[in-house]
Image (cartoon, helix red, strand yellow):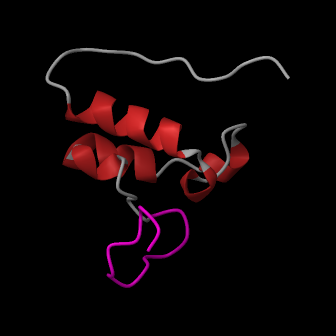
Amino acid sequence: MAPEDDGAPAPAAGTAIFSAFSADDEVGRDLAAVDWAATPLGPPRDWPQSLRTAVSILLSSRFSMWMAWGGRS
């Protein structure tokens, strides 16, 4: 089973809150509403596990944090 698949029926495209976003209900809804396919990161289902984990850590922390993701090709 994929990390974002909790067995529930999939919501409409672009509205699914995958597991990394579920670490914070309010912010997770906001992040799920982003059209990630229109960004260089692409849709969350295609993100590497390391990015999913980092997002989950950031959202579940009670401390303010920021993260940069990217690199040179």
Q: Position of residue 22 (x, y in %)?
A: 28, 52
Residue visible at 59% across and 23% down?
69
Please say whether residue 7 is one of the residues in the magenta stretch: yes
The quarter of the picture where residue 71 lies is: top right
The vertical placement of 69 against 59, above or below, is: above
Residue visible at 53% across and 62% down?
14
Question: Residue placed farthest to the bottom in the image?
Answer: 9
| Nearer to me, 38 or 65 | 65
The vertical placement of 19 against 67, above or below, is: below
* Image: magenta residue range: 1-15
Q: Total number of numbered labels?
A: 0
Please state if 69 lies on the left or on the right of 52 as rendered: right
- Magenta stretch, main secondary structure, is loop
The vertical placement of 64 against 3, above or below, is: above
Please say whether residue 11 is one of the residues in the magenta stretch: yes
Q: Position of residue 72 (x, y in %)?
A: 80, 17
| Nearer to me, 24 or 47 | 47
Q: Quadrant of the N terminus?
A: bottom left
Residue visible at 39% across and 16% down?
66
Q: Quadrant of the C terminus?
A: top right
| Nearer to me, 29 or 17 | 17
Q: Position of residue 16 (x, y in %)?
A: 43, 65
Question: Residue placed farthest to the left in the image?
Answer: 62
Residue visible at 51% across and 45% down?
49
